[in-house]
Image (tube, rainbow, N blue to C red):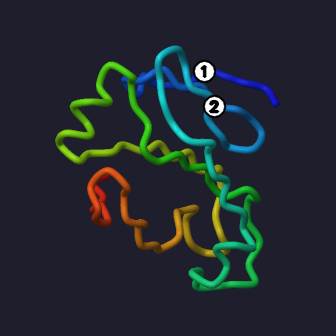
Amino acid sequence: MMSVPLAFDPGIPLRLAEPELAFEYGPNVFGPVPEVRRLDAIRPSLREPDCDGPDPVYGIAMDIGREEDRPLLEKRMLLFGAVVYAAGALGQEPVRSQGHIHAVAPHSGWSPPEVF
């Protein structure tokens, strides 16, 4: 897997691991193993479930951050995520993440809302 710098500064040291749309974390950054969403997994949420499109569709890593910020994030019950989308379309609609409900976060006991 080849690692490349991102085309912008996300404010946290991340690199894109191609071709699987995953992330590699820089020094002193915490985060889970990124999850990769494949086309077949999100077909039920598409207008045209039998369409063609990029595969994988997107990569996501939730609850990432700098180690130095971890205590403050936990105190305020915040978590951050990173998502990278493939170029292209899913039939007639743009590449996007599938609809979902967040799992209950262990540090807060509730399902966190999302702000984009």
For residue 18, the mark is none
The residue drawn where x is 67% and y is 23% is 4
| Image-quadrant location for residue 58 | bottom right
Discs 2, 1 touching: Cβ within 8 Å: yes
The outermost residue toward the top is 27
The residue drawn where x is 52% and y is 14% is 27
Quadrant of the snapshot with the N terminus: top right
Residue 73 position within the rendered picture, expressed as x and y whole percent measured from the top left: 26, 37
Please tell me whether mark 1 sits on a helix, a strand or a loop: strand
Amino acid type of the residue tagged 1 in the rendering: Pro
Q: Few, some or many C-alpha atoms within 10 Å of disc 2 (few <14, some 14-19, many ≥20)?
A: many
Residue 104 position within the rendered picture, expressed as x and y whole percent measured from the top left: 37, 65
Q: Nearer the viewer, residue 18 or 52?
A: 18
The residue drawn where x is 62% and y is 28% is 24
Residue 109 position within the rendered picture, expressed as x and y whole percent measured from the top left: 29, 62
Taking the image as shown, residue 53 lies to the left or right of residue 46, namely right
Q: Few, some or many C-alpha atoms within 10 Å of disc 1 (few <14, some 14-19, many ≥20)?
A: few
Q: Nearer the viewer, residue 19 or 54?
A: 19
**Mark 2 lies on residue:** 16
Q: Nearer the viewer, residue 3 or 91?
A: 3
Residue 81 position within the rendered picture, expressed as x and y whole percent measured from the top left: 42, 45
Taking the image as shown, residue 78 lies to the left or right of residue 63, namely left
Q: How many marks?
A: 2
**Mark 1 lies on residue:** 5
Mark 2 vs 1, N-terminal side: 1
Please tell me whether mark 2 sits on a helix, a strand or a loop: strand
Amino acid type of the residue tagged 2 in the rendering: Leu
Q: Nearer the viewer, residue 96 or 64?
A: 64
In the rendered image, the vertical position of residue 93 relative to residue 107, given as above or below: below
In the rendered image, the vertical position of residue 4 relative to residue 20, given as above or below: above
In the rendered image, the vertical position of residue 14 relative to residue 86, given as above or below: above
> Marks 2 and 1, how far apart in space?
6 Å
